[in-house]
Image: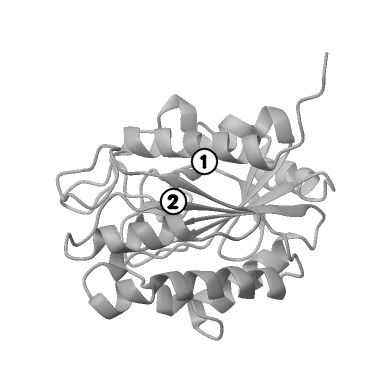
Amino acid sequence: MGIASSNQSTENRPSKQIFILSGQSNMAGRGGVNGHHKWDGVVPPECSPDSSILRLNAQLHWESAREPLHADIDTKKACGVGPGMSFANAVRKRVGVLGLVPCAVGGTAIKEWARGQPLYENMVNRAKESVKSGGEIKALLWYQGESDTSSYNDAKSYKDNMESLIQNVRQDLGSPSLPIIQVAIASGDSKYMERVREAQKEIDFPNVVCVDAKGLPLKEDHLHLTTEAQVRLGQMLADAYLANFAPPPASS
């Protein structure tokens, strides 16, 4: 009851800065998920909850954000630590109250995020719902592409598909210059992983920046980032946002 009432009071603050988290499993978060598909429950201090960090849950209600952020969104797999909370903690002192909108679903290819597809439409609907109680969408954080590394055709068409997604989401949200921070993948099928990474780094649209996850530690499955890697990635995403899109800090 106490949580609900405190959320109610924070929910309608017009200053809410909203960030969409989308893509596949490394955005949803598998940090700390073991081979038996159970999360170890370890929350690093960089991912601690804070009264200024909210999350739009699956029922489209704002609540206090905590790990795992995608537990009720990416429901077919066990979710653990992702980059969202460390990102939020790294930017909150500059932006005030944050609203995170988790939308990522593991194992999804870029074509499943095309306009008209359920994943895309759900992301857009959640994003639109997120601003109804006040606030502004400040950026889309995107980490996806591992599922497009096995097929030559998928890898070859990745750049066009990603550019279409950027154009479509900006149009559908009525935000033609919406900042997009995408992550260049750190894992996937070695056959076409580099081709997908090249496509991600070659996208040359205004207000689109790329953060490279390559070199961050992977779990034993050689696919998912470790908890520590997710913390670092969240901080890298925060650095990219603060350097490229956030207003400069107020001078003391």
Camera sees residue 71: no
Residue 144 % position (x, y): 40, 61
SS class, disc 2 = strand
Q: In this rendering, would 150 be left or right of 197?
A: left
Q: Where is residue 183 in the image (x, y as percent from the top left)?
A: 44, 51
Q: Which of 70 and 147 is in front in this view?
A: 147
Residue 180's spot in the image, x, y percent?
59, 55
Q: Quadrant of residue 195?
A: bottom left
Which residue is at the front of the view, 165 or 203? 203
Name the quadrant of the N terminus: top right
Residue at 39%, 52% in the rendered image: 184
Answer yes or no: do the residues labelled 2 and 1 have beta carbons within 8 Å? yes
**In the shown orientation, is residue 244 left or right of residue 34?**
right
Q: Which mark is residue 28?
A: none
Residue where numbered disc 2 is placed: 183
**In the rendered image, which residue does mark 1 sit on?**
237
In the rendering, at what x and y percent does residue 241 appear?
61, 41
Q: Quadrant of the C terminus?
A: top right
Q: Which residue is drawn at 52% across and 41% down?
A: 237
Vertical position of residue 55 compared to residue 53: above or below:
below
Point 23% across, 42% down: residue: 218
Q: Residue furthest bottom?
A: 116
